[in-house]
């Protein structure tokens, strides 16, 4: 900093710190950057660092730039399957899917109706019939299995993290992660009903791997 | 499957006390995670159980039998490391079959056992491959499979997921937990990662500087840490901890820097005062138990840093000379530099005695 360089290049500077210190240093570095008004390019494999510190993230895989954007834009609208799976923890859950003429999405072990305009958009963007459906853990709600017309699954594991609980669920052939408040309590092997926040589901073309909604 | 009991185990390396009078019981078919920072003595403890390290004093019991005099091989425990140590030239099938061959089991028996284990581990389709053709997670499963066919008394695991990338680690966490449940075996697992401990354990034992700090179910340890070390070590982001004292008259907690006062009930005051120390206290509150006030009430601060994580946003709020981390839903958006007021969920705040480091509540 004393040299007042034009640009700071940083290569995983926080990797060797323990989790608590890393969280503190993240915030400290971000504050310094904005306080000093310096230009910074920061390299990391840790998506939490990228999300929390940057003004914009450039996601790179196999030497190809996948997507560039503000953290929440990338999180909410990942452009490719790679970005969708790489950003977010627990990772986004995926299932193979196809869309039928009556606008019903057929996943591995579940079906759901798509709004007509969403279905039309998918048809316009897909290059072939095979799709990949994606949903983030916080966009799944869990209810008692008695609820009608919901998607059914069973609890594989329960992981309490303190501030939230992560459920691994089996729905047909697919596996989903759902995160809930710690007060929600289901047990392994229990049958549950799932519902997805329809405004926040993701669909990708299975061949081009690109987003289609 | 068996109970593991550690009774008053002490281990020294020269003048350094690595384990100081550690007692802990891992019940039959239980998943216990030993959690602590690097250098806490976790691996040493595991090695004492396995018989790889000689204790200075104390006893180790497996299934009620004192094994102190037994060699590692006699104890019949499976030890799984972060380094998988698979035989590179053998197939997955041969790797898993190896302990049975060494025991001279019949070919038919070996096949039945290997298939059974492969099914639980979900690696049936990989049996003909060589280790080099497997991902890190798959190699880990094979190592586990090789331990499983032996039907040991218990599984000892030393940070087995450390070398995996975070996505695979998340996956394997839930897989290991499922496997332990289906196997119905005793697991004693060591890690420095509090997320692994919280998510997998039936019970967590927190170890620091060779001393057991707390033993309990994950949510209980999270909600009711018994001392400052446990409070700061479990949870991410960490619990906010700020020096304060108690004003017994008004009554209120008062920031040592003079930046804030938090009025408290008389019951709350009496509980603290009963400890005899009202000056050197630490106020603790987890980031999810702090909220941003919608009116003028609360403690004033300004936004130091905003950290969007996608499913939530962490705000670092500066109050006087302290920083409070606040966790909010991703829909809540405020700019860096803004002024605001903080409120605490008073049912979930903690107070510690700064001298004894123990929780008052």
Image (cartoon, coloured by chain):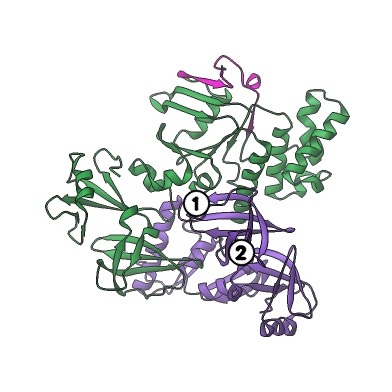
Between A33 and B33, the one nearer to me in the picture: B33
Q: Is residue B62 highlighted in magenta?
A: yes
CB contact under 8 Å: marks 1 and 2? no
Secondary structure, mark 1, is loop
Q: Is residue B182 highlighted in magenta?
A: no
Q: Using the rendered image of the protein, determine whether residue A79 is visible from the camera's viewpoint.
A: yes
As drawn, which residue projects farthest toward the top?
Answer: B69
- Chain shown in green: B
Between B94 and A177, the one nearer to me in the picture: A177
- In the rendered structure, the answer to whether residue B189 lies left or right of residue B356 reads right
Q: Colour of chain A?
A: purple
Dot 1, how many residues are within 10 Å of its Cα: few (below 14), some (14-19), or many (20+)? many
* Discs 1 and 2 lie in a common subunit: yes
Q: Where is residue A49 in the image (x, y as percent from the top left)?
A: 49, 63
Is A9 drawn above or below residue B43 in the view shown? Answer: below
Can you tell which mark lies on residue A202?
A: none
Q: Earlier in the sequence, mark 1 or mark 2?
A: 2
Residue range (magenta): B56-79
The quadrant of the image that shows the C terminus of chain A is: bottom right
Q: Where is residue A209 in the image (x, y as percent from the top left)?
A: 72, 72
- In the rendered structure, the answer to whether residue B289 lies left or right of residue A187 reads left
Inter-mark Cα distance, 1 to 2: 21 Å
Residue at label 1?
Answer: A161
Q: Position of residue B352 (x, y in %)?
A: 28, 45
Image quadrant of residue A210? bottom right
Residue at label 2?
Answer: A86
């Amino acid at each position: 900093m004393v040299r007042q360089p034009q640009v700071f290049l940083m290569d995983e500077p926080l990797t060797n710190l323990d989790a608590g210190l890393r969280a503190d240093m993240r915030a400290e570095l971000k504050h310094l950057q904005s306080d000093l008004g310096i230009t910074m390019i920061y390299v990391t494999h840790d998506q939490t660092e990228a999300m929390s510190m940057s003004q914009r993230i450039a996601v790179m895989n196999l030497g190809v730039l996948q997507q560039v954007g503000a953290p929440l834009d990338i999180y909410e609208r990942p452009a490719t399957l790679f970005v969708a799976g790489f950003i977010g923890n627990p990772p986004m859950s995926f299932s193979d899917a196809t869309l039928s003429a009556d606008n019903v999405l057929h996943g591995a072990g579940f079906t759901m109706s798509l709004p007509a305009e969403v279905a039309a958009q998918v048809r316009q963007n897909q290059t072939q019939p095979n799709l990949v459906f994606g949903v983030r853990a916080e966009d799944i709600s869990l209810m008692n299995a008695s609820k009608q017309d919901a998607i059914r699954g069973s609890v594989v594991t329960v992981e309490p993290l303190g501030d939230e609980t992560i459920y691994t669920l089996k729905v047909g052939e697919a596996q989903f992660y759902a995160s809930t408040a710690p007060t929600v309590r289901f047990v392994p092997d229990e049958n549950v009903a799932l519902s997805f926040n329809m405004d926040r589901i993701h669909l990708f073309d299975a061949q081009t791997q690109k987003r289609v909604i | 499957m068996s109970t593991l009991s550690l009774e008053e185990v002490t281990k020294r390396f020269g003048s350094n006390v690595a384990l100081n009078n550690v007692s802990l019981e891992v019940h039959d078919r239980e998943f216990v995670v030993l959690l602590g920072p690097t250098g806490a003595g976790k691996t040493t403890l595991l090695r004492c159980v396995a018989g790889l390290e000689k204790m200075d004093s104390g006893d180790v019991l497996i299934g009620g039998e004192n094994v102190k005099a037994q060699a590692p091989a006699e104890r019949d425990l499976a030890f799984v490391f972060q380094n998988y140590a698979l035989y590179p030239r053998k197939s997955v099938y041969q790797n898993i079959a190896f302990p049975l061959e060494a025991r001279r089991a019949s070919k038919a028996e070996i096949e039945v056992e290997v298939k059974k284990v492969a099914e639980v581990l979900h690696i049936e389709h990989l049996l003909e491959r060589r280790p080099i053709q497997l991902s890190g997670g798959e190699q880990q499963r094979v190592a586990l499979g090789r331990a499983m066919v032996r039907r040991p008394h218990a599984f000892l695991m030393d940070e087995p997921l450390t070398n995996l990338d975070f996505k695979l680690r998340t996956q394997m966490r839930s897989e290991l937990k499922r496997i332990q449940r289906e196997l119905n075996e005793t697991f004693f697992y060591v890690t420095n990662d509090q997320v692994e401990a919280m998510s997998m354990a039936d019970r967590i034992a927190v170890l620091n500087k060779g001393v057991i700090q707390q033993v309990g179910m994950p949510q209980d340890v999270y909600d009711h840490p018994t001392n400052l070390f446990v409070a700061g070590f479990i949870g991410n982001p960490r619990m906010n901890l700020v020096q304060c004292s108690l004003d017994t008259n008004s009554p209120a907690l008062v920031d040592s820097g003079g930046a804030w006062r938090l009025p408290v009930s008389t019951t709350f005051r009496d509980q603290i005062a009963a400890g005899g120390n009202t000056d050197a206290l630490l106020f603790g509150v987890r980031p999810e138990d702090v909220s941003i006030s919608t009116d003028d009430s609360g403690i004033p601060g300004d936004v130091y840093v905003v950290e969007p994580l996608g499913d939530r946003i962490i705000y670092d709020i500066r109050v006087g000379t302290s920083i409070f981390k606040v966790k909010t839903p991703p829909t809540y958006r405020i700019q860096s530099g803004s002024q605001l007021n903080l409120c605490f969920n008073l049912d979930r705040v903690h107070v510690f005695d700064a001298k004894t480091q123990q929780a008052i509540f």
